Amino acid sequence: IQLSAERLRRRYRGQITGDLETFDRCVDTIIRQVGDIGAMVDEFSAFARMPAPRFAEHDAAELLRAAVFAQRVADPDVAIDIEGPKGDATLVCDGRIVGQALANVLKNASEAIAARRALSPGLAGGIRARLAIQGDTLAFEIQDNGVGLPPKDRDRLTEPYVTTREKGTGLGLAIVKRILEDHGGRLDLHDATPPPGACVVLAFPYSHPSPQAAQTNADGRKVRA
Ligand SMILES: Nc1ncnc2c1ncn2[C@@H]1O[C@H](COP(=O)(O)OP(=O)(O)OP(=O)(O)O)[C@@H](O)[C@H]1O
Ligand SMILES: [Mg+2]
């Protein structure tokens, strides 16, 4: 897939007259995500063997934007709004793994909207992807106006193999929960306000940047002390 995408770019980039930026972003997304998938498959063949996170500083807003962009490409029929704080939102995490968690949750939101649309066609479904920093918590809140969480056994939804979808494996939220635990954070599921819909919150521990604590490493990038 990667080689084909690179070939498409080499061969046809010069012929694009319209929206070159979207072409570039889409090809980059394919190449990057296939690379990520390859690395993930290498590292864990099953949920039981999740890779240990490799922590580094990441811009949480950029992680959210990248995941939202990929979901918009996957399902262009569902509008996704991004809201976020201005200024620093540096998260110490494994960026690839947190990207996977966001992707799983955005996919669920989109599927919940598709399920509601199957009942009421023409519904203008939407997702709000919000980044919020409060105290020592940085939270990604993904709210949708889909069918909403099932009324029964809600606390079991994050267990492996629990699914209400015909084609679901039920691993999506179990993986997200595990990722949050590995980062010292937590996963919460609520009803959307206003209903119907669901709001899924990925909360990570956050430490506010302090100028004294920032140092510069060998290649000139800032690191936290
Ligand atoms: N945004 C949401 N709205 C409504 N229900 C949800 C939402 N997210 C998760 N759920 C419920 O939680 C269940 C478990 O989700 P999970 O992501 O673990 O598995 P899945 O989506 O069913 O399968 P997979 O992720 O493997 O495709 C879903 O089947 C669904 O019932
Ligand atoms: Mg899922």
Image: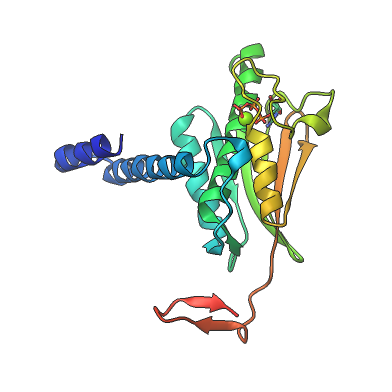
Q: Residue at x 65, y 42 (%)?
A: 176
Q: Is residue 21 visible?
A: yes
| Quarter of the image where the N terminus is located | top left
Q: Which image quarter has ligand 1?
A: top right
On screen, residue 210 above or below 132: below
Q: Is residue 193 visible?
A: no
Q: Nearer the viewer, residue 38 or 59?
A: 38
Q: Residue at x 25, y 38 (%)?
A: 3
In the rendered image, which quarter is residue 205 located in?
bottom right
Q: Nearer the viewer, residue 97 or 131?
A: 97
Q: Nearer the viewer, residue 162 or 136?
A: 162
Q: Residue at x 15, y 43 (%)?
A: 14
Residue 110: % across, % down: 59, 29
Residue at the extreme bottom of the image, as rendered: 212
Q: Residue at x 68, y 26 (%)?
A: 146
Residue 141: % across, % down: 68, 46
Residue 9: % across, % down: 22, 41
Q: Nearer the viewer, residue 27 or 195?
A: 27
- Could you tell whether 39 is left or right of 10 in the image? right
Residue 115: % across, % down: 64, 19
On screen, residue 3 above or below 206: above
- Could you tell whether 36 is left or right of 166 in the image? left
